[in-house]
Image (cartoon, rainbow, N blue to C red):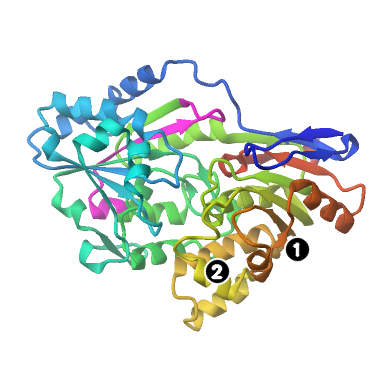
Amino acid sequence: MVKVDFPYPEYSPVQIPHENLIGVFGLPVGLHERKESEIIKETLDSPIGCPPLSEMVQGKQKILIVSDDHHRPTPIDRVLPFIIEELHSAGIRNEQIEIIMALGSHRPMSSEEIKIKLGEEITADFQVTNHDWANPESLYYAGRADPGIEVWVNRKVKEADFVLGLGRIMPIEVCGFTGGGKIIVPGLCGEKTNSDMHWVRVDIPQADIIGRRDNPLREAIDRCALTAGLDAIFNLIVDGEGEIVQAVFGHPVEAHRQGTEFAIKTHGVKIPQRGDIVIADGYPFDMEFWQVNKALDTAGMVVEKGGVIILVSPCREGFSYTHEEEIIKFGYRSKKEVKQLVARGEIKHLVTAVHMIQVAEATIEQGASCILVTNGISQEKIEKVGLGYAPDAQSALDQAFARLGKKAEVCVLRRAAEMLPIMKEKSDR
């Protein structure tokens, strides 16, 4: 037997027979060859597609720094002091700088969460606010961007003379990669922009999106973010140990493009074959199933048709703090059914519909099923939305073997939410 544990003390390990195990796969580690401070300073000194930060802010009166939120484990607190120092060197005073948390449609961050995210000193010295995506009074209309998306963005973007986005670049199913213009759209946009932007994704195959910088949705995000007024980005690339291994600073599109090349090397994991059973954890995206779905997307790329995905995560705040009502009401259905619900106006938020379609593509569309191992959502709710439940990973594995047979082969994906599987073709094995 091979014992596999999880990055959660409250979850017991799973025992997998040697003869069934394809392998245990995780992100590369030990990639941070330089000191973190050196990486950050060198990045600021090497702008991509724009002048240095100190030059760009010369003569500006109001600087807006946009940070990703508590759903993203980006070490913003370790970067901000260097950014502030650079702004100070250009004569920018603290009172000219404001920080806003890019929530998208997530819940507001508490003062304690903001303090942890940004650092205690930064929080004490600067004005920090949460984006209020549901309040029309907090938004302004920045214009229209192809393919016909109305760009409604937080007013603070319009009021600022310079807007800098801070975030992280990693592969993601919905638009190829995180980072770049996503800090504005959906980070600081209104519900209509958020929904319309996500709906661009609905008929594009997953294989044409995840791990690909150039795709229709990313192009829409870039256009919307530039239309809104994003001036520059500082994005990190983090390895499997949570260490900063690379960063990019500069033009929102040019710098992001270069950053995705680093991200592929950091997050790409070669996997020799698909598994009948795929066991994946959602760490560190465990706040709610809405985020843990990143791990499900990855597992869906690795599981055989008709197979079983075992997803392990605390899901501390349930399915979704903001969208759970619609998820519970409609459950996870096929892509065709979700589109019909949208056409009839039954699903209010298109972003919810896109989430449902993501789940369907990982499971329903290929005849696979998902067993969720969590203590953050009740068995009743899990089964109501059409997912399987197990109290622990071993029980889930027993269920999967009972369904698929004792010879079923198993893949284990550690930190699956951050992984880009690179699958070998059968002819390459």
Residue position marked by numbered label 2 in the rendering: 327
What amino acid is labelled 1 in the image?
Answer: Gly
Q: Is residue 417 left or right of residue 278?
A: left
Image coords of residue 230 (percent x, y): 26, 47
Residue drawn at x 64%, y 61% as measured from the top left: 361
169 vs 54: above or below: below
Residue 7 drawn above or below residue 389: above
Q: Is residue 136 above or below residue 101?
A: below
Check if residue 243 falls in the magenta segment: yes
For the residues labelled 1 and 2, the Cα–Cα distance comes to: 20 Å
Which is more toward the observer, 120 or 107? 120
Ranked by sequence position, the earlier of labels 1 and 2 is 2
Quarter of image, res 336: bottom right
Q: Which x, y percent locates residue 8?
A: 62, 39
Q: Position of residue 289 (x, y in %)?
A: 56, 55
- Front disc: 1 or 2: 2
Residue 77 placement (x, y as % from top left):
35, 32
Q: Residue at x 80, y 43 (%)?
A: 410
> Where, by quadrant of the figure, is residue 37 drawn?
top left
Amino acid residing under circle 2: Ile
* Quadrant that contains the N terminus: top right
- Residue under label 1, please give it: 367
Asked if residue 341 is among those painted magenta in the image, a careful observer would answer no
The magenta segment is 225-244
Task: Say few, some or many: other residues with alpha carbon within 10 Å of mark 1 (under 14 / 14 to 19 / 20 or more).
Answer: some
Residue 412 appears in the picture as rendered: yes
